[in-house]
């Protein structure tokens, strides 16, 4: 019985050490996010597996008030920066290209995404004329265009 109690104590200590390490990683990543994006007022964070990241820090741009999220790995590398933007902030050429490819598209939200490789993408949640929800993604240079059905619809 005493051995079991000792093992439980060791397991509990390892669990506490792992949690302390995760908190320290989150603090370092948060400090870096604040340094890289001083114009964003961060209001929260969570652990994530999205975009090959460990953490996502969310807040609002102090100048535009647009929601912004910074995705980071446990070692503090930024994997993606997403900002929800109005449709009018999408370059006119891209809006025209999408309109030519998909007539009757009704856009409900737009995000601008700066990816790890420094490519900028625009991601649209939208509805086709038929009523089917879709996601559209286009690289800022117009070269990479993807249309897919929205998940869970």
Image: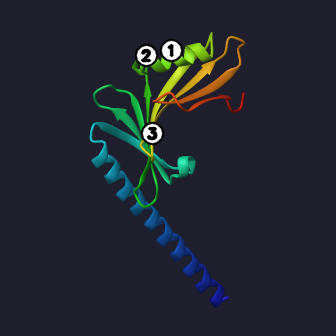
Q: How many marks?
A: 3
Position of residue 41 measured from the top left corner of the image (x, y, whole percent) = 32, 37
Above or below, 31 against 86 in this view is: below
Q: Tell me the CA gap for discs 2 and 3.
A: 18 Å
Above or below, 106 against 116 in this view is: above
> Between disc 3 and disc 1, whose residue precedes?
1
Position of residue 14 measured from the top left corner of the image (x, y, whole percent) = 53, 75
**Left or right of 40 in this view: 53:** right
Residue located beneath label 1 in the image: 96
In-front residue for pair 56/12: 56
Above or below, 132 against 3 in this view is: above
* Circle 2 SS class: helix
Of the 4 image quadrants, the one containing the N terminus is bottom right
Q: Tell me the CA gap for discs 2 and 1.
A: 6 Å
Position of residue 133 measured from the top left corner of the image (x, y, whole percent) = 67, 22
Q: Tell me the residue at 43%/21% (across/down).
A: 90
Of the numbered discs in the image, which one, if any, rests on residue 119?
3
* Circle 3 SS class: loop
Residue located beneath label 2 in the image: 92
**Left or right of 122 in this view: 27:** left
In-front residue for pair 77/16: 77
**Image quarter of residue 24:** bottom left
**Image quarter of residue 148:** top right
């Amino acid at each position: 019985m005493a051995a079991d109690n000792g093992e439980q104590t060791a397991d509990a200590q390892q669990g506490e050490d792992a949690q302390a390490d995760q908190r320290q990683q989150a603090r370092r990543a948060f400090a870096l996010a604040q340094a890289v994006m001083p114009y964003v007022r961060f209001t929260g964070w969570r652990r994530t597996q999205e975009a090959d990241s460990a953490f996502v820090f969310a807040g609002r741009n102090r100048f535009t008030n647009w929601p912004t999220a910074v995705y980071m790995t446990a070692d503090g590398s930024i994997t993606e920066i997403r900002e929800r933007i109005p449709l009018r902030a999408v370059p006119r050429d891209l809006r025209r290209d999408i309109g030519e490819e998909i007539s009757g598209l009704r856009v409900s939200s737009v995000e601008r995404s700066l990816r790890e490789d420094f490519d900028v993408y625009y991601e649209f949640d939208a509805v086709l004329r038929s009523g089917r929800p879709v996601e559209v993604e286009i690289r800022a240079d117009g070269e990479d265009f993807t249309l897919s059905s929205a998940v869970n619809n």
